[in-house]
Image (cartoon, rainbow, N blue to C red):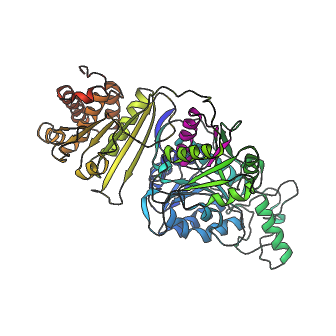
């Protein structure tokens, strides 16, 4: 089954598919959609959703639920993740399986709640005090988020350990079409059997470093503590027993199956990008372009950040001449990569700390500079693919429905026209009235980079949006603006005004319909999706009782496009506007 899913929706859907039936959390941007989905879905399947008073209580409730045998999850972002650290250490030492999602945003402190970062990478590994085991997975796409959520529960349940899903705002709010597989609920936790009176809750063997778990509510009673403990769970101050315990719970993480990496064009690569999380998307595009220019570049994607795949990096350093590490922080994982490379090759750190995703050009420029410095140019071994990528940007203020319009355009392309599509969104911290934008990328091929770099069509519904984005449009692109809301520069040859709000108010009686009129006009002018696909997507999303108004808005947008006076210099960018009935 295929669905257009947001990353956070995919995470929640996968958690339920894996067997998660308990969620406790506190809402925080940009993770809140996970809690919202769980609040709707869990009660309908005999699960439990609790909104707690804070993140400390949230992870504590998950620990308690897990001790009864429930598969439990919570989700948060940087400030809340900081509050969870003490209980995270408790779960590590007491060996209690839970899954924690950290949708990273710019920090420290409140930071920039709606913008992406990878500033929690070291906190995920060392945030709680003391030596401790931890598994950290980093998704790069919506499908990856789905798959890694299931993998997180597999690891957590089988190894009796907390697992962190280290997402970021881009992946959390990204929308892509995902083919949702059939998944059977997991049953991987080894539970106690045999006579209850002889049960030792932390007894292991050479064959299995993971003890069987006694569940609260069963005859297998035991003592749970954050203190170092004996096999029976009672506290101990014995130095040897304490050393043996922390060695065992740490060593059980170092398994071949946790060396989770993906390689792209590395067989003959002379330069390699090493990336994790959403920067992988920009790196893929950059490496592809580098190869088209005769640079033998490759990409190593790290999916399991901790335990860190040092052996993989070591081998990569032996076969390449330089490594490039893009991170949305001031350089955190690059230290581990340098240590693993052990001076065999130079390691170049690319940092970004202002809340913006890397562009492919950011990484490509570094690859070209290194290739020139090291004399690594060759004849291109791949030909540039024919351009089929279309970039559309919708800009306005919160409350105008432009992010929803972006979702509708994405569903029209991905679900009804069967094209590849990615939708991203950016909005301010205000609940309504702040700046917002939606980017929609439509292609016949797989889409690497999810942001619009130079949109061919820009729909602008606010003056602030015009001021911010009117210069980013592609050469020959078209800017559609609402005449009631935007005054363009007199010399803006891209801009064409339309009375979207006036028509919505005077003809349809609904000012909010202006976004659908504008969207339909964009579709008619660019033909990025078929008219039938747009109508189907609009009606799929339209609340009950609004279908006729939305249908009328679409038709009115189509007619505006037919009537539009397009400047001659813009006509060459678009195919001729045909009559749309």
Position of residue 470 relative to residue 384, above or below, is: below
Task: Give the camera-side residue of 334 and 35.
Answer: 334
The residue under the point 59% across, 62% down is: 62
In the image, the segment drawn in magenta is: 269-297
Where the C terminus falls, by quadrant? top left
Left or right: where does residue 88 sit relative to residue 171?
Answer: right
The residue under the point 57% across, 43% down is: 368
Q: Is residue 545 visible?
A: no
Q: Position of residue 433 (x, y in %)?
A: 27, 56
Hey, which residue is sitting farthest right in the picture? 206
Q: Position of residue 9 (x, y in %)?
A: 48, 46
Does the stretch in magenta take in 275?
Answer: yes
Quadrant of residue 81 in the image?
Answer: bottom right
Q: Position of residue 552 (x, y in %)?
A: 21, 31
Position of residue 297 relative to residue 113, above or below, is: above
Left or right: where does residue 83 sit relative to residue 205?
Answer: left
Task: Give the camera-side residue of 68 and 233.
Answer: 233
Task: Give the camera-side residue of 442 and 216.
Answer: 442
Left or right: where does residue 332 sit relative to residue 556?
Answer: right
């Amino acid at each position: 089954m295929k669905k257009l899913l947001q990353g956070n929706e995919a995470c929640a859907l996968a958690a339920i598919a894996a067997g998660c039936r308990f969620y406790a959390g506190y809402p925080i941007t940009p993770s809140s959609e996970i809690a919202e989905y769980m609040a709707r879905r869990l009660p309908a399947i005999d699960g439990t959703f609790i909104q707690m008073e804070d993140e400390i209580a949230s992870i504590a409730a998950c620990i308690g639920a897990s001790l009864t045998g429930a598969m439990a999850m919570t989700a948060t972002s940087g400030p809340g993740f900081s509050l969870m650290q003490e209980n995270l250490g408790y779960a590590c030492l007491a060996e209690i399986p839970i899954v924690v999602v950290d949708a990273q945003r710019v920090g420290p402190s409140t930071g920039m709640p709606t913008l992406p970062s990878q500033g929690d990478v070291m906190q995920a590994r060392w945030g709680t005090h003391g030596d401790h085991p931890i598994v950290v997975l980093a998704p790069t796409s919506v499908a990856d988020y789905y798959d890694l959520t299931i993998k997180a529960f597999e690891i957590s349940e089988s190894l009796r350990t907390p697992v962190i899903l280290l997402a970021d705002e881009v992946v959390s709010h990204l929308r892509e079409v995902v083919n949702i597989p059939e998944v059977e609920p997991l049953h991987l936790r080894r539970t106690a059997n045999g006579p209850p009176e002889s049960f030792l809750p932390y007894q292991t063997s050479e064959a299995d470093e993971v003890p069987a778990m006694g569940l609260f509510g069963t005859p297998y009673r035991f003592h749970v503590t954050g203190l170092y403990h004996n096999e029976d769970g009672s506290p101990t101050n014995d130095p040897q027993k304490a050393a043996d315990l922390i060695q065992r719970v740490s060593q059980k993480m170092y398994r071949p199956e946790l060396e989770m990496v993906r390689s792209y064009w590395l067989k003959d690569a002379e330069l390699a990008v090493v990336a994790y999380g959403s920067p992988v998307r920009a790196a893929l595009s950059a490496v592809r372009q580098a190869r088209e220019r005769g640079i033998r570049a490759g990409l190593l994607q790290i999916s399991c950040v901790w335990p860190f795949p040092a052996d993989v990096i070591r081998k990569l350093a032996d076969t390449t001449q330089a490594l490039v590490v893009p991170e949305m922080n001031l350089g955190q994982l690059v230290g581990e990569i340098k240590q693993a490379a052990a001076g065999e090759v130079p390691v170049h750190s690319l940092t970004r700390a202002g809340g913006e995703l890397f562009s492919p050009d950011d990484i490509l420029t570094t690859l070209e500079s290194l290739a020139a410095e090291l004399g690594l140019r060759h004849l291109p071994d791949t030909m540039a693919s024919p351009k089929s990528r279309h970039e559309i940007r919708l800009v306005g203020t919160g409350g105008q429905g432009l992010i929803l319009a972006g979702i509708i355009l994405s569903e029209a392309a991905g679900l009804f026209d069967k094209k590849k599509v990615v939708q991203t969104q950016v909005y301010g911290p205000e609940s309504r009235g702040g700046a917002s934008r939606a980017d929609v990328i439509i292609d016949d091929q797989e889409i690497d980079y999810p942001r619009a770099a130079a949109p061919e069509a820009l729909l602008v519904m606010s003056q602030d949006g015009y001021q911010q984005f009117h210069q980013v449009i592609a050469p020959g692109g078209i800017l559609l603006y609402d005449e009631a809301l935007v005054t363009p520069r007199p010399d803006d040859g891209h801009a064409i005004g339309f009375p979207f709000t006036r028509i919505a108010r005077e003809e349809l009686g609904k000012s909010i319909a202006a976004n659908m009129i504008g969207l339909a006009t964009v579709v008619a002018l660019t033909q990025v999706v078929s008219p039938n696909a747009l109508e189907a997507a609009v009606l799929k999303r339209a609340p009950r009782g609004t279908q006729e108004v939305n249908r009328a808005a679409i038709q009115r947008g189509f007619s505006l496009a037919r009537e539009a006076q397009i400047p001659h210099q813009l006509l060459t960018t678009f195919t001729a506007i045909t009559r749309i009935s």
